[in-house]
Image (cartoon, rainbow, N blue to C red):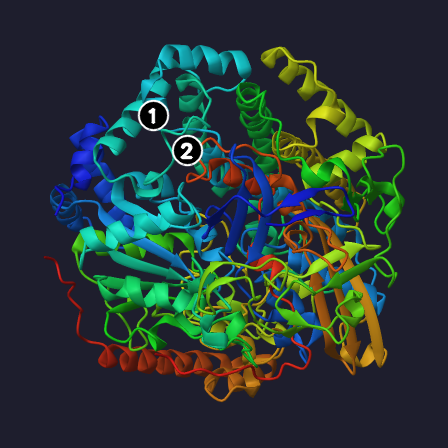
Amino acid sequence: MSLHQTPDGFQLDNGGRRIVVDPVTRIEGHMRCEVNVDSNNIIRNAVSTGTMWRGLEVILKGRDPRDAWAFVERICGVCTGCHALASVRAVENALGIDIPHNAYLIREIMAKVLQIHDHIVHFYHLHALDWVNPVNALKADPKATSALQQMVSPSHPNSSPGYFRDVQTRLKQFVESGQLGIFKNGYWSNPAYQLSPEADLMAVTHYLEALDFQKNIVKVHTIFGGKNPHPNYMVGGVPCAINIDGDMAAGAPLNMERLNFVQARLQEALAFTVNVYIPDVIAIASFYKGWLYGGGLSAKNVMDYGDYATVKGDKSTDKLPGGVILNGNWNEVFPIDPADPEQVQEFVQHSWYKYPDEAKGLHPWDGVTEPHYELGPKSVGTKTNIQALDEEAKYSWIKSPRWRGHAVEVGPLARYIIAYAKGVDFVKNQVDTSLAAFNQLAGTSLTPKQALPSTIGRTLARALECQYAAEMGLDDYAGLIASIKNGDSSTANIEKWDPKTWPKEAKGYGTVAAPRGALGHWIRIKDGKIENYQCVVPTTWNGSPRDPKGNIGAFEASLLGTPMARPEEPVEILRTLHSFDPCLACSTHVMSEDGADLVTVTVR
Amino acid sequence: MAQLETFYDVMRRQGISRRSFLKFCSLTATALGLGPLYTARIAHAMETKPRTPVIWLHGLECTCCSESFIRSAHPLVKDVVLSMISLDYDDTLMAAAGHQAEAALEDTIEKYKGQYILAVEGNPPLNEDGMFCIIGGKPFVEQLKHAAQNAKAIISWGSCASHGCVQAARPNPTRAVPVHKVITDKPIIKVPGCPPIAEVMTGVITYMLTFDRLPELDRTGRPKMFYSQRIHDKCYRRPHFDAGQFVEHFDDEGARRGYCLYKMGCKGPTTYNACSTVQWNEGTSFPIKAGHGCIGCSEEGFWDKGSWYARLTDIHAFGVEANADKIGGTVAGAIGATVAVHAAISALKRAQTKSASKSVQKMDTH
């Protein structure tokens, strides 16, 4: 047993019982989590491990920078498109390409659509089952459920008792079939579930409604990018040319019909978010008013690069501004510069990689990653059958990025804390209004500073950001129509399409407010080819292992102090980890220094 | 073995009338491109079959296949998951985690030996003793082999499981390999694409449940009903190709008129997929219609076949279209001949595929 205080002020105690959760499900990719609980079943130590590595950036070396977007887009099919966007931004930044206004707006609409889709699927299909008990929904009174629905969201059309009765009947028959499918072995008798049967039925119903809804909003990507997941992007603009009333407009990528289609999907998204998603989050949260755990690092350090500029290329007009808050001081937001070698750095002392000097961090432009898989002396099990990890040694395929040496939390909550601190009107109104609704339902009087840094706050911020994204998307759409009306139908700048026009060497970066948080890509181009490519992604920040100073990442910090009703049933761990929307394929794809072959083994 | 409910039982108990049930069957037949005569066969199959257990594993991947799957419009994915299959293990969607998740997997393998479908998304890396992808503290490849042992059949979802995809692109640092390289004794249906089209995924599953057999596969293991035509063969821009009308650069007049993207590097002429027929996201569009060339994401090794924007003329297997480009751009009179030659070559290629995979694989049904 050892006690340890991190420089950021978190107490760690790895005595007591060790609980292992592997696989952590309902996430993107593969993840393991180990915690120590004390005699009162309170979590006193947490170890988060990324358990996959694909080596994408090694694969990018020597390739055409104009092709990179498609490779990095395949980092993740859930937040599909955000890596492609970061990539084209990085290449354009390196080569000094200014994209047309329409192209900028179309990419903006696509980015907002991704936020909407990702947030809704995350809440209903990856996160809801941490709060909602579908088995308990069988006990609900459909009439009372209807009344609840009409109270929390009077504008939602699907609210009749008969509607809820039909869903309940279907659910009942599903459960009675004995084939529980995805609900099998869930923790349905665990007292950590606190919703009333009616709230459970309402939420399960919306699980199904959201499943139907989500397939429609992504069609905006299909219009602009041809498909979803993985719509197409291009360096210099967008591939979808505009032809409103010229010859052959009907066969053009964008014409009046296609644009109307986009607008209709955005309007539906706003309605669903306002009538279903946000009311659900507030209603569910009110049942868990006493469960304000999970804040962790968000109460101290948060970061984002900022995004959604009103004026293309002018960061000061970002509708979600960037910056860094340290030690919970919302009165001061530090500026962030992705190009400054002293600011964003990655460490590997506790990651399965090697650095020449592991006490130091490296800026992504100079990033080095040499895979080096080894377990520490205190680990239990073997190299290919891990029972318990040794967090004092290397223990994850994720690196530890830090801002000026500080561990920070990223994500919608981080963005909302920064925007609230900076006084962004839309965000301030949303936070204050939704918190007032919560306080009224729950009979509490929580302030933003008390409520936001928590698991519930993280989940609420995501829902609010979804609404903001839909509103901004509609603004972008109006801007696009206005631009076309003004006679501008340009969608691509091809002046520097030919690599012969490029300098011999160039470097650039691209940042995106990705659904899960601050995303950055850094590229070096030499002789028309990719010399070095590095991504530092949201889950790398949040899921990072310890750093040389002993600071812990956001996942680990968020679990500390949380009581578990039944330690063998990790509902509370899942609830808080899911509130970050972990994406492990994103976080663990870094490059090998020279792309050298690693050890080869024979298939048994 | 447990008494399993049939699909029809489930629908009836949901209060769905026989009339609606038959309508569903007819829609399914249409969705699969089958004639109205098949409605009765589908209805019969639905009335007598239990919900088939499905184990869905994830290796090295990006989850785009799962994301695509949940976009299915016909059938809706909620109907697939609630009423058609029993998705007993899928770490992306399942409620349980850790030990309880692993127990759900073991339970299904044990209880439904030889009866479950194993769906695999992603692939196993073999370097570092497989520890580039760890599930439950062990290499993913072990879980894959274990689950495959008693599977009735395997579906390799997407280009990762079918071909290796992006992590297997040069130099493939983790030595990621497609499923059929480690599982060699089971029928495997490859459904490539990055990702595959949603309705293609649910179409393959619905076909298997309905007819209780594997779809007819081509010589590389892909269902012929979705992968026997090149995107170019049914592309709505094909007349522009034949007329020699090409986009010369992005956002030019040709791009605005929807001309052929061949000169922009479109891989439609060498890519077998249903994008230009079924289209994406409930038939909304597909890459070429949205102005970008096809990148060939359902073809093996497409990451290493040159830039998205490099013209296909460099590729040996291409043949006819290289000439067609030159002809199309210059002599209008030659167009008719080009089309004729092209059609002949296509017919020949189809015949080759056909003879190579004549036999329909029958699934073991007991």
- The label number, if any, that marks residue A448 in the structure image: none
**Pick the front one: A252 or A516:** A516
Q: Is residue B290 visible?
A: no
Write down the residue under mark 2.
Answer: A208
Residue under the image location 85 percent in, 52 percent down = A313
- Left or right of B142 on screen, residue B235: right
Point out the residue furthest to the front here: A1
Q: Is residue B353 visible?
A: yes
Residue under the image location 16 percent in, 31 percent down = B18
**Pick the front one: A217 or A576:** A576
Whole-angstrom CA distance, mark 2 to mark 1, is: 9 Å
Write down the residue under mark 1.
Answer: A167
Return the chain for callout 2.
A
Kind of residue sitting beneath label 2: Leu
Disc 1 secondary structure class? helix
Taking B180 as reference, is A434 above or below it?
A: above
Taking B15 as reference, is A100 above or below it?
A: below
Q: Are marks 2 and 1 in contact (CB under 8 Å)?
A: yes
Quadrant of the image for the C terminus of chain A? bottom left
Give coordinates of residue B269: x percent, y percent.
Answer: 48, 75
- Left or right of A342 on screen, residue A439: left
Give coordinates of residue A365: x percent, y percent.
Answer: 79, 69
- Residue density around tag 1, few if under 14, some if 14–19, many if 20 or more, within 10 Å: many
Kind of residue sitting beneath label 1: Val
Disc 2 secondary structure class? helix
Point out the residue furthest to the bottom here: B316
Give coordinates of residue B126: x percent, y percent.
Answer: 45, 76
- Residue density around tag 2, few if under 14, some if 14–19, many if 20 or more, within 10 Å: some
**The quarter of the displayed image where residue A364 is located:** bottom right
**The quarter of the displayed image where residue A400 is located:** bottom right
Query: Do discs 2 and 1 belong to a common subunit?
Result: yes
**Pick the front one: A333 or A275:** A333
